[in-house]
Image (cartoon, grey):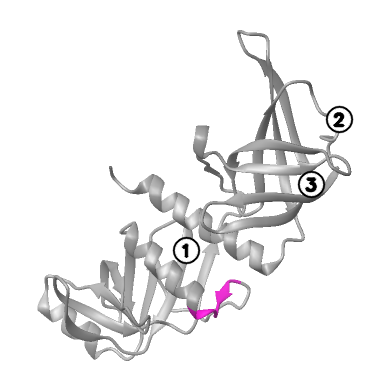
Amino acid sequence: MTHHEINSQFAIHNHVEIVHVLNELAKHRVLINLETHEGDTLVTTVLYVSGDRKFVCIDVSSDDDINQKITDSNLVSFESQSRIKVRWHSTHLQLVTARDGLAFSLHVPSVIERIQRREYFRLYTPQGANALVCKIPLGEEEVLEVALVDMSAGGIGITYRGAANDIFVQGAILEGCSVEFPELGRMPMNLRVCGIWNSTTTKGGEQIHRVGLEFVGLSRGVTNVIQRYMIQLEAEQITPT
């Protein structure tokens, strides 16, 4: 990992949002690459954010010399080992006695980066009773509800049952759609049809259709919610059970 400047395209400045991201890293024990300006490195994890949301505690090394070098450094960088990268800097770390022993303590950063390097890397979304649902308006009062099967920073894959719907035409723009995210709320969005796959028929004779939809002109707020959900989803999928 090399030290870098914060890229405004991926920067998050909202303190509540930053604390949420750090809490997700701690909850799912996502591995973090720590590197000092002098080149000392450590693979660690976020332990927790303090109750007053001012400090974040990071796990220490078993090597006291490494810990000393890290606390002596005036610039330390962090980067998560996940496909959606979470990165930030700290100018100084302190060794403190935390809940379960020694830990590094640092101020919750004022800005972090959240980067998905491959825009169209897809994560499979929950199915069954926990499936996400996209609502697509068909008319004044009619709404088509379709289940999500996967998601990327660029769009979603959906399935629906029954007769083929003629709204799904390559390149068509579907306006006024929405997806309800658990604990995050309903997110409005416009979608473009970017892929139509052949339908399959079940043994009972029912047709199942698969369609790829691309996000169009998402607001920054909705983009942040989608990225937050994907970080949480990926962490859940890679956490050992």
> Farthest residue toward the front?
141
| Residue 85 position within the rendered picture, expressed as x and y whole percent measured from the top left | 47, 63
* Image-based side of 23 in relation to 17, left or right: left
| Residue 211 position within the rendered picture, expressed as x and y whole percent measured from the top left | 71, 34
Which residues, given as a range, are shown in magenta?
10-15
Query: Which residue is label 3 attached to?
Result: 192
* Image-based side of 235 in relation to 5, left or right: left
Three-letter amino acid code at the position of disc 1: Lys
Query: Which residue is label 1 attached to?
Result: 85
Q: Mark 3 vs mark 2: which is more N-terminal?
A: 2
Distance between the Cα atoms at labels 3 and 2?
14 Å
Q: Can residue 165 be seen in this view?
A: yes
Distance between the Cα atoms at labels 3 and 1?
27 Å
Three-letter amino acid code at the position of disc 2: Asp
| Residue 207 position within the rendered picture, expressed as x and y whole percent measured from the top left | 70, 17
Q: Is residue 30 visible?
A: no
Q: Which residue is drawn at 38% across and 78% down?
A: 77
Label 3: few (<14), some or many (≥20) within 10 Å?
some
Question: Would you say the residues marked 3 and 2 are in contact, meaning their CB atoms lie under 8 Å apart?
Answer: no
Q: Nearer the viewer, mark 3 or mark 1?
A: 3
* Image-based side of 75 in relation to 202, left or right: left
Q: Which of marks 3 and 2 is in front?
A: 2
Q: Mark 2 vs mark 1: which is more N-terminal?
A: 1
Query: Relative to 199, is 50 above or below?
Result: below
Query: Which residue is label 2 attached to?
Result: 166
Residue 216 disc label: none
Distance between the Cα atoms at labels 2 and 1?
38 Å
